[in-house]
Image (tube, rainbow, N blue to C red):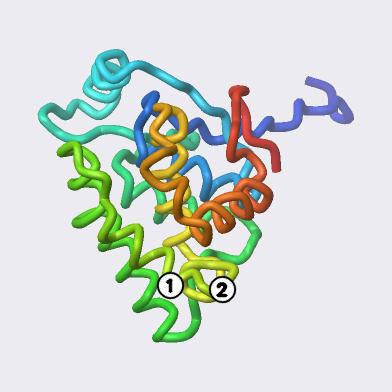
Amino acid sequence: MGLFSKSKPKVSASPKLKCMLGDTASYKCLFLASYRKIPIEIEWDEPSVLDDKMSESLHMSNLNRFPCIEDGDFTVCGESAVMTYLNIKGREPTVHPRKARVLAMQQYWIQVLKTKFMPQVDSGDQGATALEALDKALIGQKYITGEFSLADIHWAAALKVLEDSSKTSIFSKYKNITDWLAKMKTEIPDFDVKNQKVAA
């Protein structure tokens, strides 16, 4: 190499988010990356295929290994770990309420989703109790806690999966929820993502 020869610039590849089709946790991570304008590549897989890939890359077994993010030589899997990573990475402000009351309500509504609504829907119930409470909470508010929070990300992902499964009848009768969801579709750039990349 000569004294004045140019070296090739290093190309920084976008992080790769490995998602499972029909998986609520995968959409949560996708929506968070999209909202925070983090450029990522998306790889969609069927459950068995993704499970095998994660076992091979992380040498783990009998663990929930999706969604998963690969960023250079760093790999981490699981909803909580990936969302934590995506909420800190990048230049955009993190989705983290500064007020204690808002943070507490964020965690409350995430808990309602995970411990009340999703188990009821999975068991064939309509999740009416949780939906009625959420619909009431949204009266006069743009967002679930009053300001955009991870509660919006979590609930939007859950309802997205229901939409894709032709189960909108579960929540379509709740006007405040449907109005809020319509707003989420405009504020989360890749809500209906079909391609393999989320642009910054």
Residue at (46, 46) in percent of width and height: 172
Q: Nearer the viewer, residue 170 or 18?
A: 170
Quarter of the rendering containing residue 91: bottom right
Q: Residue furthest front?
A: 173
Q: Is residue 119 left or right of residue 196?
A: left
Label 2: which secondary element: loop
Q: Residue at x 42, y 70 (%)?
A: 136
- Name the residue carrying label 1: 137
Residue 141 has which mark?
Answer: 2
The image quadrant of residue 54 is top left
Quarter occupied by the N terminus: top right
Distance from disc 2 to disc 1, alpha carbons, whole Å, reads 8 Å
Name the amino acid type tagged 1.
Answer: Ala
Of the pair 124 and 87, the residue shown nearer to us:
124
- Extreme-bottom residue of the structure: 100
SS at circle 1: helix
Name the kind of residue labelled 2 in the image. Answer: Gln
Furthest-right residue in view?
A: 4
* Contact, mark 2 vs mark 1 (Cβ under 8 Å): yes
Can you give x and y, in whole percent of width and height, for residue 175 in the image?
52, 57
